[in-house]
């Protein structure tokens, strides 16, 4: 586990190989007792988890307020309380699944230092989970030792609590989906096991849940490609504009 002190409160991680099949690069930054999580590429999304308990999924300040929205916030909810120390419990706020069969090729090699995680076996997903806890890293490592979870990083926060990043594998292959063209995007997004266009699935799609107070945000990151609106592809379902997602296309 990497212990991240109060002077350099940053951690970058990704799934896969920097020169081959991989996920987006995710950045985690802590400031005092607040934590900010964002993904790489051109996606303008940022999750923020505040000392007050308020959590937000919002467009970044650089992106601004999208047309038709009153502010940059997409989802706002209140997380559960951080459990007291020595209870062996934590407050999970974000879990991201990366289905191995939907990793992307032909992405730029990141120039900054990044912690690389091996993907799950084919047909499964590597998950990254982020949690607040009052327990110290030695206690958390001992608690995780008999489980299938691995502690990756621990942020020491100003309010004497900790923010942990862990990983585990789940038996989730992923879903094949299609996103119809919308707005100024004249093409569909296609999330499919077969890369018929040989694009390398170079578009990264982040699909998210809609958490209520006390819940954690759950997200699934996929590689996708462009396809013509009239092209026929067999998929599990259609991802409409009512489903919250971010994408890394320009």
Image: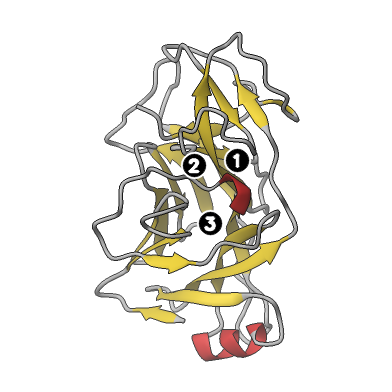
> Where is 209 relative to 238, above or below?
below
Q: Which residue is mark 1?
A: 208
Q: Dot 2: what SS?
A: strand
Q: Dot 3: what SS?
A: loop
Quadrant hosting residue 120: bottom right
Q: Residues within 10 Å of mark 2 (few under 14, many from 20)?
A: many
Q: Which residue is mark 3?
A: 53
> Where is 237 relative to 79, above or below?
above
Q: Which residue is mark 2?
A: 57
Q: Residues within 10 Å of mark 1 (few under 14, many from 20)?
A: some
Q: Are marks 2 and 1 in contact (CB under 8 Å)?
A: yes
Which quadrant of the rendered structure holds the C terminus?
top left
Query: Viewed as shown, does residue 241 lie left or right of 21?
Result: right
Coordinates of residue 153 in the picture (x, y in percent): 45, 74
Q: Nearer the viewer, residue 26 or 234?
A: 234
- Counting residues from the N terminus, which is met first, the one under dot 1 or under dot 3? 3
Residue drawn at point x = 31 percent, y = 29 percent:
64
């Amino acid at each position: 586990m990497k212990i991240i002190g109060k002077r350099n409160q940053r951690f970058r991680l990704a799934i896969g190989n920097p020169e081959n099949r991989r996920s987006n690069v995710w950045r985690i930054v802590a400031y005092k007792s607040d934590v900010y999580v964002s993904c790489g590429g051109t996606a303008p999304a940022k999750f923020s988890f505040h000392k007050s308990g308020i959590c937000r999924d919002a467009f970044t300040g650089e992106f601004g307020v999208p047309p038709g929205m009153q502010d940059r916030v997409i989802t706002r909810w209140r997380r559960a309380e951080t459990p007291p120390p020595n209870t062996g419990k934590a407050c999970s706020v974000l879990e991201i699944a990366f289905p191995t069969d939907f990793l992307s090729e032909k992405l730029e090699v990141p120039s900054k230092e990044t912690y690389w995680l091996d993907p799950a076996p084919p047909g499964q997903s590597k998950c990254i989970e982020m949690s607040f806890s009052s327990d110290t890293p030695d206690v958390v490592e001992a608690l995780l030792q008999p489980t299938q979870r691995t502690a990756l990083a621990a942020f020491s926060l100003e309010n004497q609590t900790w923010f942990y990043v862990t990983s585990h594998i789940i038996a989730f292959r992923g879903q094949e989906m299609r996103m119809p063209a919308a707005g100024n995007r004249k093409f569909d997004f296609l999330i499919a096991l077969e890369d018929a266009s040989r694009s390398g699935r170079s578009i990264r799609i982040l699909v998210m849940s809609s958490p209520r107070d006390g819940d954690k945000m759950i997200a699934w990151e996929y590689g996708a490609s462009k396809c013509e609106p009239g092209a026929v592809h067999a998929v599990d379902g259609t991802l409409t504009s009512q489903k919250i997602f971010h994408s890394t296309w320009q």
